[in-house]
Image: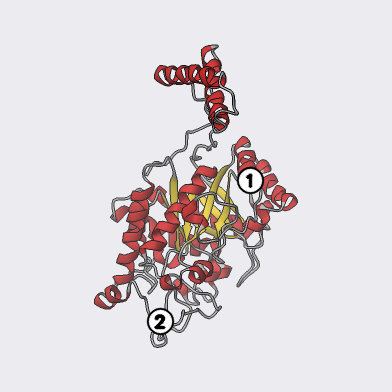
Amino acid sequence: MVTAQRKKKSKIGKISKTIVLIQIILGCFLLFFASLPFWAMPSLAVKINFLNESATASILQLIGKEVVVEEVSHVKLPEQVKAIYMTSWVAGTRDFRERLVKIVDTTEINSIIIDIKDYTGKVAFKTEDESLAKYEASENRISDIKEFLEYLHEKDIYVIGRISVFQDPHLVKMRPDLAVKKTQEGDVWKDYKGISWLDAGATDVWEYVIDLARYSYSVGFDEINFDYIRFPSDGDMSQIYYPFSESRIMEDVDMGKAKILREFFSYLDGKLSDLDLVISADLFGMVTTNGDDLNIGQVLEYALPWFDYVSPMVYPSHYPTGFIGLSNPAAHPYEVVKYSMDRAVIKAQEAGIDPLKLRPWLQDFDLGADYNAAEVRAQIKATYDAGLNSWLLWSASNRYTVDALLSD
């Protein structure tokens, strides 16, 4: 995939001579039919109106006017991505979103991640694509999405759109045949939070996600970030059945899920390769240190070849007691992030992949310990000390520790 964006607003120059000639002929055709009375051939009124538009275009062309077509702007990928996350609800609330834009204006932050489709399965803006409209997922939380993205681009802010892939209760409702099921009853399976999931092996889901990614790029997103690209984990796993993946998982209990996801990653890359689009993936933090697929299908080495960037979610609060000998990993942000990303760098190098593809999610929320400027900055330092140069800050509340960030 391409790793830089270069497209700006452009003008389409003068139309080809062939098209101009055709339009001149249409203009003459117009003059002929315009001499006929409408009462004799009423239907010609519509035709003449159409021809009049063509003739007008021809005249403008002949006098040297250019036909201008507005294209959506895109911002070039920064050498170092330093981003904060913004929910779609905040993106649709002008005063709140401006507080986050101000952070970008005044600190080292240069990128914003915005939800396109979150864990509810709802798409945050109206879509005009038939392949998407049929699923009725649009909630239009960001009513001025194109204008907002253009506003961010005018400030040279790089915009990443986040798509929750296989956790999607809305699509489950619209297409229950694609859902993870209960083994016995055949009803839709739900995790402990009551959330339903899509079978990661269902290619109809893959196509839906690709259509959404392509449309989002056409709206103005510079990069598409894929999250929840995994099999479910936090539910009654003894009562679970995958209608599209079951046989392959049974054939290869250890790596069947991982191989299915690897095929999905490869499919994404292939289907989006014609666009000047950066794609990235979010994985559990433990993929940096584990050798298995965590029973969710995620293997770091299986994702790295197919994405421009991979973001392990190395939130210290999410590591188990005893990780690298720490009784409370959340209280040791530098140690957890440094150890994890060091291991990730080694894995990338052993796979023959540039470690700079690694771009971790860092914690800016209180869980397991209070996170203030020192704790947030410690994670950033750990990222740099591991030889990496980019990072993303996560705060579900969208409130960030500005004191942890360098001034612009």
Residue at the image point whose x is 45% and y is 82% from the top:
187
The spot of residue 99 in percent (x, y) is 72, 49
**Which x, y percent locates residue 408?**
64, 40
**In this rendering, is residue 8 above or below 152?**
above
The three-letter code of the residue at mark 1 reads Leu
> Considering the numbered disc 1 on the image, is that residue within a helix, a strand or a loop?
loop
Q: Nearest to the eye among marks 1 and 2: give it.
A: 2
Above or below, 358 against 149 in this view is below
- Residues packed near mark 1 inside 10 Å, few (<14), some (14 to 19) or many (20 plus): few
Left or right, 25 with respect to 148, comes to left
User: Marks 1 and 2, how far apart in space?
Assistant: 47 Å
Q: Which residue is mark 1?
A: 406
User: What amino acid is labelled 2 in the image?
Assistant: Ile
Furthest toward the top, the residue is: 63
Q: Secondary structure at mark 2?
A: loop
Q: Which residue is mark 2?
A: 240
The disc label shown at residue 316, or none = none
Q: Quadrant of residue 247?
A: bottom left
